[in-house]
Structure formats: C-alpha cells, structure tokens
Image (cartoon, rainbow, N blue to C red):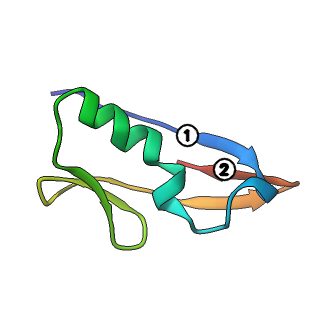
Amino acid sequence: LGNMCFSFVVPADEIRFGDFKNLVKPIVDALHDMGATGAETTGRNDIVIDGKKFSGNAMYTRNGRTFSH
C-alpha cells in the first residue's frame, strides 16, 4: 500500500468555490485508469472507492487563487 497526495491551485474565477466534484475529476479519472473503476465523488468533498473513503478534500481561496488539497 502507498500514499497519494495531491493539490490543485487554480484561478478563483475558473471554478465555483466548493465544487469539489469538478476539481478532483482528474484524480477520479486517474484512479479509473489504474483499475479502481469504483472510484467516485460523494457527499460534499469525499472520493470513495467501492464505498470506502479514499480521500477527503479541503479548499480555500486567497489572492485570486483557489487551493484544494
């Protein structure tokens, strides 16, 4: 087993604050490509694989940029 850490920094006007589903879509797509076809976003800010929590995410905006990790 390993760990995965990811962050995104985007211009604040390019994404609606709190829109985790669209922001983490590249991660979900990569998980699908790696064989975790049950990966999906759920709730407000979680990624699950086959119903088990894989990641919780946080977001903040400052100086015109939105940071998500």
Mark 2 residue type: Phe
x, y percentage for residue 10?
A: 72, 45
Label annotation for residue 69: none
User: What is the spatial separation of the Cα atoms under label 1 and label 2, in whole angstroms?
Assistant: 7 Å
Q: Position of residue 52 (x, y in %)?
A: 14, 57
> Residue 67, relative to residue 2: is it above or below?
below
In the rendered structure, the answer to whether residue 47 lies left or right of residue 19 reads: left
Q: Residue 41, located in which quarter of the rendered image?
A: bottom left
Marks 1 and 2: CB-CB under 8 Å?
A: yes
Q: According to the image, label 1 marks what residue?
A: 7
Q: Is residue 35 left or right of residue 43?
A: left
What is the secondary structure assignment of the residue under circle 2?
Answer: strand
Three-letter amino acid code of the residue under disc 1: Ser
Residue under pointer 2? 67
Residue 68 in the image: state x and y as whole percent.
Answer: 58, 51
Which residue is rendered at x = 28% and y = 35% of the image? 31
Q: Please determine whether, in this image, residue 32 is positioned above or below residue 24.
A: above
Q: Residue at x 42, y 72 (%)?
A: 44
Question: Considering the image in quadrants, where does the N terminus appear?
Answer: top left
User: Local crowd at mark 1 within 10 Å, few (<14), some, or many (≥20)?
Assistant: few
Relative depth, front residue between 50 and 56: 50
Location of residue 51 by image quarter: bottom left
Q: Residue furthest bottom?
A: 43
